[in-house]
Image (cartoon, helix red, strand yellow):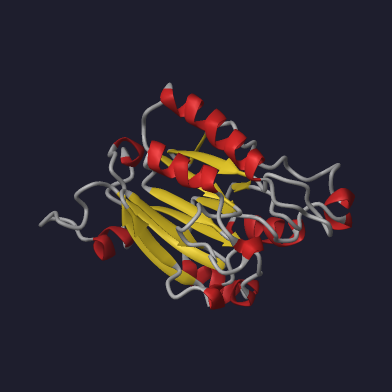
Amino acid sequence: MTRHLSIEWPDAAPFRNRGGAPIRLLAISDQFDPALADQRNRRAVGPIDLIVGCGDLDYDDLAFLADGFDAPLAYVLGNHDGDARWEACEAYCPEAIRSTAVHREAGLSIAGLTWPGSRGPRANRSELGAWNQALRLAVRRFRRPEPVILFSHVPPRDAGDSPIAGYHRGFSGYRWLMRRLRPPLWLHGHTPLASTTDWHIQRGATTLVNVTGAVVLEIWPPGAWSSPTIRPEEAAQN
């Protein structure tokens, strides 16, 4: 089942010339949502401005959804994205997001954190690698203070992870990065939905969303929900 979530963005700049309409993301990871294989269901989802992949999906699934929604794709690699499937498509697959770069997509600043360790059947966790990612990205964001969407395969420690399962623990470096940058939105996968009680949580200024499967996110301009002249459902119809 494709889940839906709306959030309000703190900066009005990305919404210029959109007539009050939200920026719509499809975030996916780990398990292909079978509902999206049907064209009728994709049509019901509506237009998508950007597809965000948070790891551990076949590239064929990512490409299928990008083509099906006619939307740009940005993705990071998960711990399983290093096997023969990915080696076979190296010649034609778009490159995954680099963990130290900030990109502009659909009018928003986004930054991805790929799995910080070896990938494939013998994948290993690297806390040091996660800290390296966090520190390097924090330095880059210091020069560009506007709000950013962070997306990763693994969530921050104690923020959407599975604390009783060592392999599914979040990274301490990511938790530090979240507190340092205070991103309005952090998307991740890796955490089995059955091991958590909430698939989206709030930590300070950050909404963290476990997108295992698929989540449609509508990002609204500041004040859209409180304005007496525009409501989210009305803007979506324009």
Question: Would residue 118 appear left or right of 140 to someone viewing this image?
Answer: right
Say whether residue 206 is visible: yes
Say whether residue 48 is visible: no
Instruction: Give the percent coordinates (x, y) of residue 165.
Output: 61, 68
| Picture layout, residue 119 above or below residue 103 | below
Question: Which quadrant: the C terminus?
Answer: bottom left
Q: Residue at x 61, y 54 (%)?
A: 153
Instruction: Give the percent coordinates (x, y) of residue 22.
Output: 35, 53
Instruction: Give the percent coordinates (x, y) of residue 7.
Output: 33, 56
How many numbered marks, from 0 up?
A: 0
Instruction: Give the percent coordinates (x, y) of residue 154.
Output: 59, 54
Furthest-left residue in view? 228
Question: Would residue 42 appear left or right of 177 to someone viewing this image?
Answer: right
Viewer-closest of 44 and 61: 61
Furthest-top residue in view? 143
Q: Residue at x 31, y 35 (%)?
A: 13
- The quadrant in which residue 133 appears is top right
Q: Residue at x 42, y 71 (%)?
A: 198
| Picture layout, residue 35 above or below residue 186 | below
Q: Residue at x 32, y 42 (%)?
A: 15
Viewer-closest of 138 and 126: 126
Viewer-closest of 113 and 12: 113
Viewer-closest of 116 and 223: 116
